[in-house]
Amino acid sequence: MLRFVIRRLLQLVPVLLAIATLNFFLLQIAPGDAADIIAGQSGHATPEFVAALRAEFGLDQPMWKQYLLYLGKLVTLDLGYSFQYQLPVASLIADRLPSTLLLMVPSLAIAIGLGVALGVVASRRRGGWVDGLVSIGALVVYATPVFWLGLMLIVLFSIQLGWLPSSGMVDVRANPAGLAYALDVARHLVLPVVTMALFYIAIYTRLMRASMLEVYSLDFITTARAKGVPEGGIAWRHAARNALLPVVTLAGLQFGHLLGGSVLVETVFGWPGLGRLVFDSLQQRDLNLLLGILFVSSIVVVVANLLADLTYGVLDPRIVHK
Amino acid sequence: MKLRSIVTTTTAAAVLLCAATLPAGAQKKGGTLSFSYQPEPSALSTIATTAMPTALVSTKIFESLLEYKGPELTPQPGLAESWTVSPDGLTYTFKLRGDVKWHDGQPFTSKDVKFSVEKLIAPMHSRGKVYYGSLDVVETPDARTVVFKLKKPVPFFLKAFQPTESPMHPEHLLGALDFSDAKNIRQSDFMSKPVGTGPFKFKEWKKGSHIVLERNTDYWKKDRPYLDQVIFRAIPDGAARAIALETGEIDLAPMNAVPQADIARLGKLKNIQLSNDGAEGLGPLLWLELNIREKPLADVRVRQAISMAIDRKKVVDVMWYGQGKPARGPLVSGNPLYDKSLKPFEYNLKKANDLLDQAGYKRGAGGVRFKMTQHFTPYGESFQRLAEYTKNELGKLGIQVETQSADMGGWLKAVYTDWSYDMTNNFTHNYSDPAIGTQRAFVSSNIRKGASFTNSMGYKNDRIDQLFEISGVEIDPAKRKAQYAEIQKILAEELPVIFLVEIAYSHLWNKRVHGLITNGISMYSNWDSVWVD
């Protein structure tokens, strides 16, 4: 087990190197660079000004040199400075990470919990009205554009009812502290989490239902039934545990997306997360920042998948990691 | 040198003026003003970037030597209580106030002015060369006197002291940095934790969420500011910003901060005020930029035909929902140098067709005369719709247009770095003087790859070059006005770009806010007189 973990961690090195290289060269394809954008925003910049910026950012160097410099810094875990913000990339990511986690972890937890439960319930009544209701509901939510759903929730709960704030993470004007701050953040969190969770619930419901139906057709379920195990026990204790494997795989993959957050939800609700930082840095051609975020999120994806692999062993003792 | 005082204004006059414009006792002290704009600033000093979000926030923190009154930006005392200009226009002497302190309590002196201009603004500000390109030396005979000596006259020199253009920075905090590399300045902590002399002090910046500025209790105007706090809120989605204004979560959406389609609707709400005033000093102007290096766009008749095919009134009413007015040339009508004798551009498809016939572009198969490509500015929906409209109208003339879309980086590269475009709509600013915002687009010395918002068209007219050169040093206002009138006539005739619309900068605010519109750069002013119910 330990050797398995160590081996997987060592495999990380070439994977991350490949990702870093791919990211670096892919981002070069986009036309224009950060100096163009900053000069453009300034509204009036001489070619000397643009050239000075380019030199300052190291963008005047040949690409292979930029690449080697980038790798050299990466080895020492130095993610460099953001061109746009002129702040260390690591600090910008660290700034946004907590709010991204605050949005994504509850959303994903609710989505997995409810999705699994609804999937099990639907599969037990296959073809019945409960199944139909759950399946259609899941499809409708999944097909609804997430930004539209978010805006509609704002219209209902912020404008019409006035119960919840429409954007941001905290009421800056009131400047709450202590418990009041926590409650205020929670209030701001409701709409984005609901929007986000609804989208993911649909995926997990569909996946769990399909996986359950597959497990139901296996011999050990028939055996359990023959032994007189009640249907509820079969569903939750025997079938669900086996059916969870694909859900764990998907959750492992999606956990990696946590860092990217959801650009759309963060944008609609003005949530200060990493997803928007990715989008903004792409727009601004902020190469360092973009590479930094992509690098950190690739680490998370690889580690999350490792954790998913380890979870298989817990759910299904037949899977042994050597 | 014998100096003749051309402009000397006293603080007493300014106080009288304030008393005249605001009913005594109406203003309330306290409260918060929160506003939103997209994107979030990337730094809090215009030394780092002069992008609009940075300008909006930093101008509450930093001040300059002068303040300005009215749409035409008449200079008023600011950090300088008086000033004189020598008759030859080469020496500007400013007398500084003696009671100004930086937010950290240190006194503000002439050394700070010299440091800010020589070390920061002239070399690093994006328009530093425009204002201070002819600067010879800054002298500081004593702590309260600053003398600017110029190599040649700069007729708009008194416009240089706007808070966005020449923000005063503290030497005692920045002077020790290593100035051999601009990076050291831009990457200094100061750019995100600024210290100025303005009515509001920096308090907190939570990236992606908000910036909080708080009242400077030691401000040199003893009874100002009225507000306790100014808050910038980052709300990236336009519709969400509109909702936040509607629900009262923010008080102000400045400078078209909400989608064009929402502006008129929000302006009709009973708790919201809409104003298109207060941006005259920026002079926003929309035009179609043309690459005129090659035929057919090299032919002035073709450009005139394109101009006649665009119904500017429709562009204002449909694409900009009525916020703006048709342009008549390179200057906006609010500019003091605007030539009032300019005629409206004609919308006449028949004449346009005739012009194209005369130019030799006969209709071929399918009625097509020639093909060209167009880009559009990635500033939002209105610009895309304008591109669709342009394509449609030019199609009627037999000009087949293919539209190409790109994001900001791609658009800037195509238009200004590679000149690989035929036509693009574009949006620029006159700024407070045509020598700052207009000249850059039309002089042939600015046909230079890689510089944004310059002469990407490849337009060269010796008379235009000459007129901009002499008006750039002309200190007689009447002569300068005549020179600019000629420039405007030539450009409106030759159409190196198709002048379209003076776009309005629409500001929307909650009616509990008062005193926002004070001059032609209202949103870039320090808001020390703004108050809330």
Image: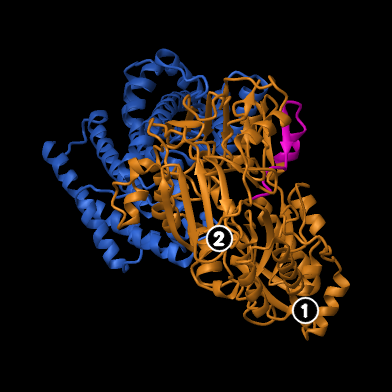
Chain colours: A blue, B orange
x 44%, y 23%: residue? A117
Side (left or right) of A21 relative to B20: left
Residue A240 against residue A11 in the figure, above or below: above
Q: Which residue is nearer to you in this view: A274 or B527?
A: B527
Q: Residue furthest right?
A: B350
The crowd level at tag 2 (other Cα within 10 Å; few <14, some 14-19, many 20+) is some
Q: In this picture, which residue range is highlighted in magenta?
A: B262-281
The type of residue carrying mark 1 is: Arg
Question: Which chain letter matches label 1?
Answer: B
* Secondary element at image label 1: helix
Q: Mark 2 lies on which chain?
A: B
Identify the image quadrant of residue B431.
Answer: bottom right
- State the residue position of label 1: B301
Residue B136 in the image: state x and y as whole percent. 45, 62
Separation of residues labelled 1 and 2 (CA atoms): 29 Å
Q: Is mark 2 on a helix, strand or loop?
A: loop
Could you say where residue B67 lies in the image, as x and y percent from the top left? 59, 42
Closer to us: mark 1 or mark 2? 1
B307 w.r.t. B172: above or below: below
Question: In percent of the image, x 40 and y 17: which residue is there?
Answer: A232
Q: Which amino acid does label 2 sit on?
A: Ala
Judging by the rendered image, the residue that carries numbered circle 2 is B406
Q: Residue A202: give x, y in percent of width and height.
A: 50, 33
Number of numbered discs overlaid on the protein picture: 2
Using a 10 Å C-alpha cutoff, classify the residue at mark 1 as few (fewer than 14 neighbours), some (14 to 19) or many (20 or more): many
Which residue occupies the extreme front position in the image? B2
Residue B346 shows in the view: yes
| Residue drawn at (43%, 45%) of the image | B110
Q: Residue B327: x percent and y percent?
A: 76, 59
Q: Between disc 1 and disc 2, whose residue precedes?
A: 1
Q: Does the magenta stretch include residue A3?
A: no
Check if mark 1's residue and mark 2's residue have beta carbons within 8 Å.
no
